[in-house]
Amino acid sequence: MDFVVSQLLTGLSLSSILLLVALGLAIIYGVTGVINLAHGEFVMLGAYCAWLLQTQLGWGLLPSLIPIFVAVALLGLAVEYLVIRHLYDRPLDTILATWGLGVMAQQIVRLLAGGELRYVQMPAALSGSVNILGATDSAYRLFVLAVALGLFALTWYVYRHTSIGLQLRAITQNRQIASSFGINAGRAYRLTFAYGAGIAGLAGALISPLKSVSPEMGTGYVVDAFMVVVVGGVQSLFGTVVSSGLLGELTGALAYLSNDTIAKALVLAAVVVIIRFRPQGLFTPRIRA
Amino acid sequence: MSNKPILQLLIYGAVCLALLLIPAFVDDAFLLNKFARYLIFGMLAVALSLSWGYAGILNLGQATTFGLGSYCMAMALKLKTVPIHTGAEGLPDFMVWNNVTELPWLWWPFQSLPFAVAAGILVPAAFAALLGWFMFGGRVAGVYSAIITLAAMVVVNLIIVDQQSYTGGFNGITDLARFEVLGISFDAYARSTYLLVAACLTVALFAALAVTRSKTGLILQAIRDQEERVRFFGYDVARYKTFVFAASAAIAGLAGMLYTIVMEFASPTFLGVPLSLSIVIWVAVGGRQSLLGAMLGALLVTGVQGSLSESETFLSTWTLVMGGLFVLIVLFMPRGLAGIVSGLRRRGTARKAAAQQSGSVGATGAPAGRTA
Amino acid sequence: MTGMAQAQLALRDVTVSFGGFVAVDRLDLAVNRGELRCLIGPNGAGKTTTLDLICGRARISSGAIVFDGTEIHQLSEFEIARTGIGRKFQVPSVFRELSVRDNLEIGSSRQHGVLHNLGRFGGAADRERLERLAELVGLSDDLGKQAAQLSHGQTQWLEIALILAQDPPLILMDEPTAGMTAHETGKTAELFNTLRGKHTLIVVEHDMGFVRDIAETISVMHQGRLLAQGTADEVSDDPQVREAYLGSGGIGHA
Ligand SMILES: Nc1ncnc2c1ncn2[C@@H]1O[C@H](COP(=O)(O)OP(=O)(O)OP(=O)(O)O)[C@@H](O)[C@H]1O
Ligand SMILES: [Mg+2]
């Protein structure tokens, strides 16, 4: 019993990280259709911001979260304005441009902060552990889970119940018609991109005490996030949650059962197969033949 | 694309001839080895230009097929080293270290060098044909097929790293014998090796040119333009795309084999994301819709990089600059340097035509030539 | 040359629905070899969808489509095209990045194989045929031009020429004169009259003047069904047809 619960909790923790990382990518992809290959670098920059604020200004992680969100969101805004907005009708070129941007971000960080691993302290208040059904789990991991779900709920609420959400849904249906009704699609895309980037930064900051921070850390995350989005379905926020949960538990189980490398290869191969046979994701119904 | 095939043939021929003549002027073995490496990258750029520039298939995992070719050659050359670098009973050293007791069946045929050379082209081509059939048969296109090529590369890379006892794992396959054919020995630093690479590049370039100039090449361009429409003329689009994907892989595989000869080892980094990204950058810089442009793009970028320093900070700065340049090119110059050249030439001919027409305007009253 | 038995193309009880919306509803249609059939109907009647079903762009939900005695509705698009069916689209669809000459070259598709076409580099015989075609549609001076630079009318002409280059026994034309001037429309009618007998044509059109110029038999569709069939006069006197066109201001203006 203990073992099952603790295995489930491990999976749940992985799931919450996946959800955090994937949420931003899912929003951007779902609304604008841009596959942002620099998404992992937004995560990485969030983590470096946390490290910087902690080592230079002595800030704890919790008070840093809002400034980090704002900073990375502003960066996202700039990237959208300077690069992405020119490429909305050239999808292949967006992958290329964002790939290039990701490389640039990595190199800038490497030049400024060095290539070595960095570590961020956990908030003292959350460094204890909690007992759940006989298994123990760290309080911080539960906190991350709570934040992930909270962010998801917030995003869902904005998308479903606010006027900006309504505009976004109109734009994803048909950009031209939405524009002719006076919806400023360009502005909506820009805000979406900034919000997605901000969440990625937040994800990076939250992950930083759990993993080591390095310039390349983003590469792994963009793959994970993309996987979640593909499995969950592009147009479905709930699909994102379900697939984070599923993939988190699955990765946890696979890692326990076999070696890490093969687990990774298997999951990637599964993603390839899913793209081929169900490009709309596992959890969205097929609308047109 | 030039509309004057003869002129195009002449230009391509002149460039290849110049590359073949370099050893007449360069004596430095180290430099020749470096140049040979650049030419191999040029071949990779030709391969990507064929699938991306002409058929619109963006292959983010071009390095996969390069790596497969490289491993085919390395396996054969490793088995030729018996008994110097290998352990008991003709086993490669890393297998002995990994407690493998007999040669795995996968390695058996590589005891024959001709087999290995054929495999170095056919294995990558078959891999690409399979992946292509899988993707294009299911009408996976555009961004999704790009992502699949990337994911497939990571999978192959992980498998190679994981299967250490059969592949040398993270270290790759090192300490190889020299490649020898018909009594000619191809030392990595020898003139013969450079010439071999330059000759292969020439063959690959002209083969690719023949493909693009044929009707098949035309149909591929039509597919790039409007895949849907092509089907209604009776062409099997999936087959065309699979063909060009495999042809591109064959060229990359050949490049991979040569790379093993020039570098004297094979490594999982040969099928890595960084190399794949570099290939995309070279082709974007040179011009994806021109085979020659793409190749020269590779020579230019790697040449400049190689002639500057190779320190750690320099490499970071260089990568940063290349990343920025790449983004700018994607944004503002999708046809790369070749696009600028052909743009200038078109403007030249348009001006000439306009001048000729304006002479006859008085007579016909027609407006002076509309320029593109 | 009458009766279903000899029809070159027959749609039998064909139905298609898109997520519950029935776009074509138990349609029966038979077209004889060498016939020029016009298909008319108000906007959204299902005309384009019918052509889509024939050439495989859309899949039927039930029924059967028979061409030259074989069922074709299960074949993929390129296989249907190879049985001898060519299609011109409502939104003119040519290869805009390629030159007019290259466009025509792709249209002339008697050989479809990758390897076969690998050995072909535009021979003189081909060139002559393509130049004659270009002349037929008035594009002789534009052979070297990029298709993207053609006017809308010229693009329509180019697509028609592509189909002629393909030279299929059955040609499906979706609104070939849309966007053409009266003069250009007249020339198109002339061209179609010369094709009569050599090819079977199904032409979707809104321009009744044009339809009267070319049609022998007219089929009228409404809400996915076949409403009436006959000569131009028979059809325009049909009360059901008049009613169907009521909202859209009469048959000539649909
Ligand atoms: N792929 C599709 N999914 C959903 N509905 C479709 C699809 N294709 C067509 N329809 C619908 O089917 C109906 C018939 O469309 P169709 O294009 O065949 O009409 P049409 O007779 O060609 O009209 P028009 O004269 O305007 O070209 C329309 O209501 C259209 O909205
Ligand atoms: Mg229509």
Image (spheres, helix red, strand yellow):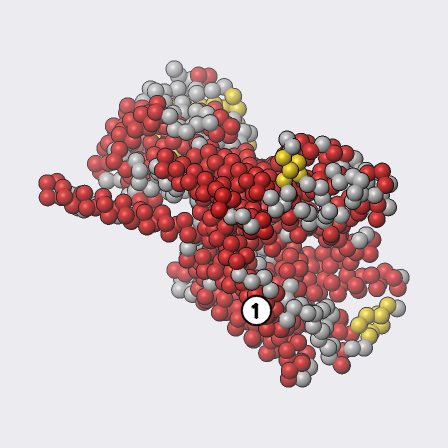
- In the image, residue B256 sits, relative to residue A126, either above or below, namely above
Residue at screen point 75% across, 40% down: B81
Residue at screen point 54% across, 29% down: C75
The residue where tag 1 is placed is A108
Given residues B9 and A238, the one toward you in this image is: B9
- In the image, residue A142 sits, relative to residue B324, either above or below, namely below
Q: Is residue B355 left or right of residue B348?
A: left
Question: Does residue B259 appear in the picture of this structure?
Answer: no
Using the image, name the chain to which the residue with label 1 belongs. A
* Local secondary structure at mark 1: helix
Looking at the picture, how far across and down is residue A163, in whole percent?
A: 50, 68
What's the residue type where badge 1 is placed?
Ile
Question: Tag 1: Cα neighbours inside 10 Å, few (<14), some, or many (≥20)?
Answer: some
Looking at the picture, how far across and down is residue B177, in whole percent?
A: 71, 41
- In the image, residue B146 sits, relative to residue A75, either above or below, namely above
Given residues B162 and A226, the one toward you in this image is: B162
Q: Is mark 1 within 8 Å of ligand 1?
A: no
Residue at screen point 74% across, 70% down: A210
**Where, by quadrant of the figure, is residue B72 drawn?**
top right
